[in-house]
Image (tube, grey):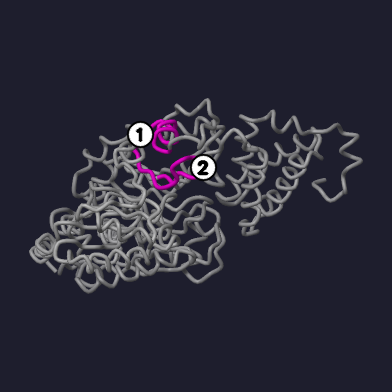
Amino acid sequence: MDLTELENIVTKEAADRKPCEIRCCIAAGCLSANSNDVLSTLRTAVEDSGMADRVNVVGVGCMRLCSQGPLVGVDIDGPLYCRVTTDNASSIVATLNGGQGEAETFEREDPFFAKQTSLILKNCGCIDPERIESYIATGGYRALHQALFELAPSDVIETVTRSGLRGRGGAGYPTGVKWATVAKNSGERRFVVCNADEGDPGAFMNRSVLESDPHRVLEGMAIAGFAIGANQGYIYVRGEYTLAIERLNKAIKQAGRMGLLGTGVFSSPFDFRIDVRIGAGAFVCGEETALMASIMGQRGTPTPRPPYPAEHGLWGMPTLLNNVETFANVPDIIRNGAEWFAEIGTPQSTGTKVFCLTGNVVHNGLVEVPLGTPLRTIVEEIGGGVPNGGQIKAVQTGGPSGGCIPQEHLDSPVDYESLGKIGSIMGSGGMIVMDDQTDMVDVARYFMEFCMDESCGKCIPCRAGTVQMKQLLSRIVDGSANRADLERLEKLCDMVSRTSLCGLGQTAPNPTVSTLRYFRDEYESRLIDSTTAKANSNGATCQ
């Protein structure tokens, strides 16, 4: 493969394009609502109508408005149909001949779409994720060619550094600094690892990108490999993501056949192989040392740092770990330049961020906005607020490691620094909206139970502390706790966060701490006096 052959594919795709394209979402959410049958019905209807020479029906990735699937769109800017069934799918084809559509439509001018800025998701819902030609037609793999033939590895790192890109896995560490650190550490080999072990409740950003635009991630990883001097990459995907795994493996084979991965990428001296490793669904394997242990065939448990993976990673070699969204940003940064990317977002938090907007909100789905966008814009304008005129009580960001942001902070900008100041974190992008009927103590108990179940058990503070905190939260919810229990809970939160081995334990108290900070009255209103508590105690709690 060379640049001319790449451009020939672009030309052929443009020549083969029919005047009209009907796009049906075949990502996991819509597939679960029978979109595969809708896709078949649409194809049959086009054939029967005699419009096959001018209408193409294609399966595409996530179209974002997941709560109203299956979704079907006519061209990029044509009607968008919601909750399409096999019964009304044919009417969509009929509209092309002046017929009346029977499926419900959603306005593309609605704030849900109009207020979004698409970088990571720009191909999602537009290209066929199972055809590499469809990705190449959008300019895919041009950035990799540019890096290999126009830039030195140090130039690539310098470009990523100047862009201000920060890791989208949660901590927000500067990506260029991490790449430079791996590149300067010596070792017989270096590795690139993509963390796709997305385990937060309510989060499906990474899954959607892998299902909808897998080549974007592969291209980003290959550019990273060239920059740091690695010839091997791994994508660690949780086993529940069967469709993402299937499409990733297909994409890797396609890229290998075209000479875009494997030996001699673009007929250059650069070799880069990518293999998929499937996790067993343990939340702790999202932690980088546990993830690497799992890749190496060991039990997925964390180890103390330092040394960090950049120095001592897979098999003791320098290893670069970034998540799906971080790698997905790289091709556009190389192609459009660091300055272009740095102008999006805030000076400290550049670019966009993809969120999974879920919970008590009108529009559930994927949202991509510039960092620094006010939280209110995301949940009230893009998300449409609480259904039936209800009031927002809190927004939980950052998954089990994050916090609950109360209504009075909805005007806070969503960036790494601002979320930290109000007691939450960016996390990987989960965003759960809660209405004024939500029991915040029960929310804290839910997340604590999640962390308790997912604790690997290696360190005592996490293993025993999450159990005790969950028990105390249950007693408060049940109305059988007293003030001493609440004080004990707060001390445990502090102890577990300070002494746990890895991020799972260190951040497990966050939802409890944030709900205590903003909704303390809900805790205290359930406390009983000490005499009653002693009488009710069964002696099986946290003494």
Would residue 372 be counted in the magenta stretch? yes
Residue ID for mark 2: 432
Q: Is residue 463 above or below residue 173?
A: below
Q: Earlier in the sequence, mark 1 or mark 2?
A: 1
> Is the C terminus in the top left, top right, bottom left or bottom right quadrant?
top right
Q: Residue type at mark 1?
A: Gln
Q: Residue at x 87, y 48 (%)?
A: 539
> Residue 27, how many percent across, how many down?
38, 60
> Residue 221, how many percent across, how many down?
30, 59
Q: Which residues are magenta?
A: 355-383
Please identify the quarter of the rendering in which residue 378 is found.
top left
Q: Residue at x 57, y 50 (%)?
A: 504
Q: Residues within 10 Å of mark 1 (few under 14, many from 20)?
A: some
Q: Is residue 526 above or below residue 354?
A: above
Per the model, the C-alpha gap separating discs 1 and 2 is: 25 Å
- Tags 1 and 2 touching, CB below 8 Å: no
Please identify the quarter of the rendering in which residue 314 is found.
bottom left
> Residue 193, how many percent across, how many down?
39, 60
